[in-house]
Image (tube, helix red, strand yellow):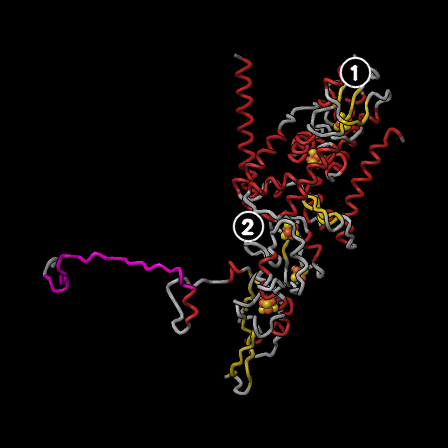
Amino acid sequence: MKKIRFMILRRLTQFGLLGLYIGANVFGWTVLQGNLSSSLLFETIPLTDPYAIMQMTLAGAVLGFDVLLGALIITLFYLIIGGRAFCAWVCPVNLITDAANKLRRVLGISQVQKRVYMSRAIRFWILGLGLLLSFVMGVAAFEMISPISMVHRGTVFGMGLGVGAIIVIFLFDLFVHENGWCGHLCPLGAFYSLLGRFSLIRVYHDAEACTACMKCKEVCPEKEVLHMVAKRSESVVMGECTNCGRCIEVCDDDALGFSLKKFATQTKEKSL
Amino acid sequence: MNERRKFILSMARGIGLAAMGALAWSAYVGEVRSAPLILRPPGALPESDFLRTCIKCGLCALACPYETLRLAAPGDNNPIGTPYFVPREIPCYMCEDIPCVPVCPTGALNEASLRNEAGAWEIKKMDMGVAVVDVEACVAFWGIQCDACYRACPLMDEAIYLKYEKNERTGKHAFLKPVVNTNVCTGCGLCERACITEKPAIFVLPNAIALGKVGDHYIKGWDSGDEARVAGAKAETTQTQINEKSAVDSLNSDEGF
Ligand code: SF4
Ligand code: SF4
Ligand code: SF4
Ligand code: SF4
Ligand code: SF4
């Protein structure tokens, strides 16, 4: 149980949130209405996707106060709990890509296939391109093609051919590239990883306790962020970490754990 | 030197790929955002503003008690995620308290456009489209009594009225022809829903498609109010140069014979 405690918590939040949204549409619940683009919490508090707001503003929209406040709330929220915590704890696409990853491991595809041939920086290009195209086309460009919105909106309001998006992402991550979508292409994940650089809650690594088994790097979907493992005691500061807690669960030596961000200078003194 | 060349080459490759991606992406976005026949919720901004302002949250759809509004799903051939309605399936019932509008967090549905001077809701200000009658398919124009659309209209005798005419074929019956006043009709589609023909003979189209525009060249001389409509008209004087040479009487001249 200890080995999958965060996994269970994550699935509970992911499905719980989906359930609340669906309940709003089907049974008229008023806890969380709308979808991940913009929602209303308890019929009063707006919550809005900040990346969508950036695109819409660049597209020339004059926006109402509610969505601007909503975007501010969401930005502050993820500044505290970790930018890409959105990815590991909320985003419905994560359920699909995690499933693909799991199957990949079961089938041993990564052993046969070369692991990395796509740059992880592509997502930042797409992030920028989304903003540029919104400005040029006068309409929020990524929102027009976003599989995240497609999957979430589809689950809540009716899917149409949106199942296609699910299948494509699943097959892409399964056969084409390990962590292909979330780790390389998704501009929303890229946006949240920018926030993540400044986030408060981060994974902390204690190099003294570490036995260098490297199980954490094996299991982490964004291995680069764990560059300090077995070398230095410090917080994972790179924004790409999703705060999924996989590394913490897998570590047998208690060398990893969630904590408030500790800065490198402080931590060095500590390990001396 | 070699490192630098490598760097420049990989940069160039990145830019090339980005340009290609941008091209495909923008082409797709340009394609899917045009849906000239779509009917938007009450109070929606003009289409191009609506498209950049709506965040596709679906709160309007959740607020509608009749499930009139739906969000475009992939495959509906409408701008993805945006709310619209299909009157023949579920029309807009023009709720007195217009619940779908104030919930909109972005202002894509403009509350102010639906309130009167006193600040109260004014459902007559809705303008989602306009009903159009196909006079060949409407049985009332054949002389069969129907008036289903007329009776369905929330603005009966204002948005739609019956025009009585003598049926010369029988000599003793009347035509009761439905006629839409396009200035008043809100485009709610209750008439389209009610129409008894297999495919509705009265149907709602967006204003931009269904309505013409006279322009400044004509005015109702008998209606002093019509002056205001052409207030911005500019006089345009064109001058045609008169040919200074004398006219040639080509028929009576011998030239060429
Ligand atoms: S990277 Fe994108 S798709 Fe993946 S979990 Fe994060 S937001 Fe969702
Ligand atoms: S470092 Fe740990 S918490 Fe962060 S993404 Fe990797 S496994 Fe998840
Ligand atoms: S006015 Fe009423 S019926 Fe019409 S779309 Fe709004 S909520 Fe639905
Ligand atoms: S409530 Fe407003 S922003 Fe949300 S889907 Fe409806 S029109 Fe769009
Ligand atoms: S659409 Fe039909 S029912 Fe609605 S206002 Fe116009 S004429 Fe009346």
Within the image, what quadrant is residue A232 found in? top right
Compared to residue A138, the image places residue A83 above or below, namely above
Helix, strand or loop at mark 2: helix
Chain holding disc 1? A
Chain holding disc 2? B
Residue B234 colored in magenta in the image: yes
Compared to residue B185, the image places residue B166 above or below, namely below
Which residue is at the far front? B118
Give the main secondary structure, helix, strand or loop, of the magenta stretch: loop
| Residue matched to label 1 | A270
Which residue is at the far left? B254
Residue range (magenta): B229-253
Q: Are marks 2 and 1 on the same chain?
A: no
Residue type, mark 1 in image: Lys
Seen in the image, is B82 located left or right of residue B15? right
Residue type, mark 2 in image: Asp
Seen from the viewer's position, the closer of residues A140 and B21 is A140
Name the quadrant of the N terminus of chain A.
Answer: top right
